[in-house]
Amino acid sequence: MGIRKILTVDEPALHKTCRPVENFDKKLHSLLDDMRQTLIDSEGVGLAAPQVGILRRVVLVDTGEEILELVNPTLLETDGEQTGAEGCLSVPGKYGLVKRPYYAKVRAQDRNGQWYEYEGEELIARCFCHELDHLDGIIYTEVMERYLTEEELMGED
C-alpha cells in the first residue's frame, strides 16, 4: 500500500467525467488499498479516484465505523435538506456553505464486483453526494453558496 498524491482544484483531471470500472482485479485492489491509506493519512472523510489522478468511478467514504469502498456507485434516493460547511482534500484550507440532502442511499459494487446498498444521514449523506460529484467532474466550489469566513468556521462545532 502506498500514499498517493492528492490533486488540487487546478488539475484538469478533477474536472472530467470518470469511466465505470469493468475489471475487478489486482490493479483495482491496489488502487483501493492506496486510496484507503491516502484517506487515513490525510485525515479526510472521503476520497474519489480522480483526486488521485485515476478517472474511474471509485470512491471511499469513512463512516466513522468503517471505510466503505464504493465502485461504480449511483445515488438511489435522497431526502430532506441540510446546509453546512463543506471542505475537500483537493481544495485545502477552504470551506464553503453547501446545501445537500439530509439522507442519501447509494448502490455500489465492492472490490470483488458484488452489488450492495448503503444509506446514511447528515455527514455520510453529505459525503456520498460530495464524492459522487467528483466522479462527474464537479467540485463543491461549483455548487456552494459561498466560502465561509474564519470567524464562521471557528463558531462551528
Image (cartoon, rainbow, N blue to C red):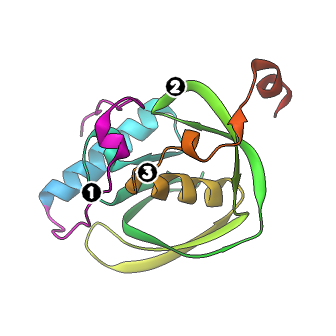
The residue singled out by tag 1 in the image is: 56
Circle 3 sits in a helix, a strand or a loop, which is it? Answer: helix
**72 is higher (above) or lower (below) than 9:** below
Q: In this view, does 144 lie to the left or right of 6?
A: right
Is the stretch drawn in magenta largely helix, strand or loop? Answer: loop
Circle 2 sits in a helix, a strand or a loop, which is it? Answer: strand
Please report the residue visible at 77 percent of the width from the left and 50 percent of the height from the top.
83
Q: Position of residue 81 (x, y in %)?
A: 77, 62
> What amino acid type is highlighted by mark number 2?
Pro
Q: What stretch is highlighted in magenta?
A: 1-25
The picture quadrant where one finds residue 53 is: top left
The residue singled out by tag 2 in the image is: 92
Please report the residue visible at 29 percent of the width from the left and 52 percent of the height from the top.
32
- N-terminal of the pair, mark 3 or mark 1, is 1
Q: How many marks?
A: 3
The residue singled out by tag 3 in the image is: 134
Gap in angstroms between the C-alphas marked 3 and 2: 15 Å
Q: Position of residue 100 (x, y in %)?
A: 68, 57
> What amino acid type is highlighted by mark number 3?
His
Q: How crowded is mark 1: few (under 14 residues within 10 Å), some or many (20 or more)?
A: some
> What amino acid type is highlighted by mark number 1?
Arg
Q: Position of residue 92 (x, y in %)?
A: 52, 25
Q: Is residue 106 left or right of residue 31?
A: right
Image quadrant in which the C terminus is located: top right
Image quadrant in which the N terminus is located: top left
- N-terminal of the pair, mark 3 or mark 2, is 2
Please report the residue visible at 52 percent of the width from the left and 38 percent of the height from the top.
44
Marking on residue 151: none
Q: Nearer the viewer, residue 15 or 88?
A: 15
Q: Position of residue 115 (x, y in %)?
A: 37, 80
Q: Nearer the viewer, residue 121 or 146?
A: 146
Circle 1 sits in a helix, a strand or a loop, which is it? Answer: loop
